[in-house]
Image: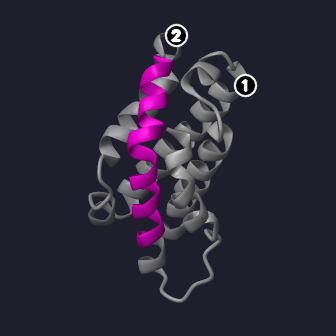
Amino acid sequence: MRRDIKAFLIDVVEATDAILEAVNGIKLDDYCNSRLIRSSVEREFIIIGEALTNLSRLNNDLFTRIQNAQRIISFRNKLTHEYVKVDNTLVWGVIQSYLQPLRSACVALAAESDPGADLPIAKAEAIDDELVSYR
């Protein structure tokens, strides 16, 4: 069965939620010293990149409305194909700078793509409010 636009947008939202949960309450040093957390975060970024790639194929106009979407896909490719050279400080910076705007955009686009639908993204508002604690 072919997945629709909303499904890929929700994949991004759920992956951002998983990343935020994984880094909740930790600092950069904690992140750098935990292979388990780093692996989890990198896996979720790979999911985000794949979902955005699929979204670009389904609806490029919608894809272009997501700020830095192409850069995020490139980041996914770097994590996947250049895993030996992953800079943990860079990953941490992406979490701090790009994750919340990406998440917010995908929440809005998912709601727009299916108005009135019951979207499984209720965590959105709570996580957006908590972002300050991750910095």
Query: The N terminus lies in which quarter of the figure?
Result: bottom right
The residue at the far top in this view is: 84
**Where residue 57 sits in the image (x, y, percent)?**
37, 56
Q: Earlier in the sequence, mark 2 or mark 1?
A: 1
Residue 72 placement (x, y as % from top left): 38, 40
Q: Residue 29: percent from the left, percent from the top? A: 59, 19
Residue 93 quadrant: top left
Cα separation between marks 2 and 1: 16 Å
Q: Main secondary structure of the magenta part?
A: helix
Q: Residues within 10 Å of mark 2 (few under 14, many from 20)?
A: few
Task: Examine the rendered structure and indicate whether residue 92 appears above or below residue 5.
Answer: above
The image quadrant of residue 42 is: top right
Helix, strand or loop for disc 1: helix
Q: Is residue 46 magenta?
A: no
Residue 44: give its label: none
Judging from the image, what secondary structure is the residue with disc 2 in? helix
Residue in the picture at 65% in, 38% down: 25
Front position in the image: 45 or 24: 24
- Identity, as a three-letter code, of the amino acid under mark 1: Leu
User: Residue drawn 51% across and 69% down?
Assistant: 6
Please tell me the numbered disc located at residue 84. 2
Residues 67 and 6: in front is 67
Count the numbered circles shown: 2
* Image coloring type: one colour
* Residue indicated by mark 1: 36
Residue range of the region highlighted in magenta in the rendering = 87-109
Depicted 113 relative to depicted 45: above or below:
below
> For the residue marked with disc 2, what is the amino acid?
Val
Residue closest to the eye, 25 or 107: 25
Relative placement, left or right, of 83 versus 118 is left
